[in-house]
Image (tube, rainbow, N blue to C red):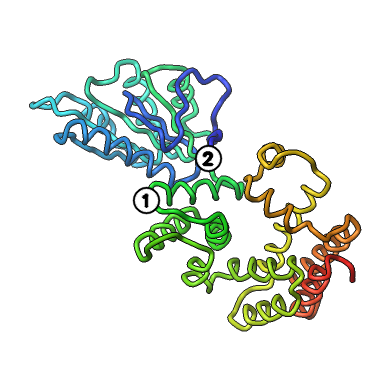
Amino acid sequence: MAGRGAGTTAKTSIPQLAWHAVTPAPVVLVTGPEALLAERAIRAVREQLRGADPSLEVSDIDAGQYAPGELLTLASPSLFAEPRLIRVSQVEKATDAFLEEALDYLAAPADDTVLVLRHGGGVRGKKLLDAIRGGLGGGVEVVCAELKREGDKIDFAAAEFRAAKRKATPGAVRALVAAFTDDLAELAAACRQLVSDTDGDITEQLVDRYYAGRAEVTAFAVADAAIAGRLGEALGLLRHALASGSDPVPMVAAFALKIRTMAKLAGARGSSNDLARQFGLQGWQVDRARRDLQGWTDEGLARAIRSLADADAQVKGAGRDPVYALERLVAVIAARGAV
């Protein structure tokens, strides 16, 4: 899940920490567009500092609405010398006054003070970021890059359940990620809801019961049945999904995701772990794709891929009957590309 935040340069001499492994430092630079991870990193800094000293003073600054002298005032020694945490948001929109005073502050950070700077991306404040990354102020950087790869989101959801000391099956995690693939905050909230509302292992059936209304979950159920060759079941699930309001576009996307993975692994040799590293997948994804490939030929995969491309165009406006396009796709895949 590591990645470079917007504006990160190659010349970085300070520690680069994962969001879940952040530790306090005189300056903590939190960069990248993933707001949920940034929020968690900043909260972790506060909790660690408060755990060490409950008298911690916490102050907030909006760098985009900065009043000159505000940082110096908040960082000045207090009467009782309590430790301080100063959280600065919107550094990517900072005023000139903030950027100038923050650079001055880095030259001599206040004792017993942690300054957290949240920069969401862009070139504004580059001189300040470069100074911190070059070592001025004795800081660390937490890069909160957007989680774009499905595998990264699966790792995130699995970690949520591990942190809650709950076991979740790989299929359950995959279904949950498919249902909330566009919003990491929603995915985290869904994990919390399942942990809070249920007991025992978290399974695919449990996820389906809670989130069957999510089009993508239903889409994977249709795709799984078709790839397994169960045409009648797949068509029944498809018609039920469409009658329940599911959109045809994510239905095709679910098929595409599975067929693409199968195509990557067709003919590939090696252990599950080796192939997972080679193709950027999880080990269980490799094992599942290998099972799904049983009975398929290269020619059948090629026909399935052509059918996917045609169905994708049809459901996105090139055809008059997206339902027929979907049913035709299901038939081709259930026949393993033999029709």
Q: Secondary structure at mark 1?
A: loop
Residue at point 47% right, 57% down?
Answer: 187
Query: On screen, 38 above or below 293?
Result: above
Residue at the limit of the structure toward the left, as seen here: 79
Left/right placement of residue 66 relative to residue 171 reads left
Q: Amino acid at mark 2?
A: Ala
Left/right placement of residue 12 relative to residue 290 reads left
Q: Amino acid at mark 1?
A: Ala
Q: Which residue is mark 1?
A: 164
Q: Nearer the viewer, residue 133 or 15?
A: 15
Residue 97 horizontal/vertical position (percent) = 35, 30
Residue at point 49% right, 49% down?
Answer: 158
Looking at the rendered image, the quarter that the N terminus falls into is top right
Residue 230 horizontal/vertical position (percent) = 74, 73
Q: Nearer the viewer, residue 117 or 39?
A: 39
Residue at point 44% right, 25% down?
Answer: 128
Q: Nearer the viewer, residue 173 or 295?
A: 295
Q: Residues within 10 Å of mark 1 (few under 14, many from 20)?
A: few
Left/right placement of residue 77 relative to residue 320 reads left
Q: Secondary structure at mark 2?
A: loop
Q: Which residue is mark 2?
A: 145
- Residue 116 placement: quadrant: top left
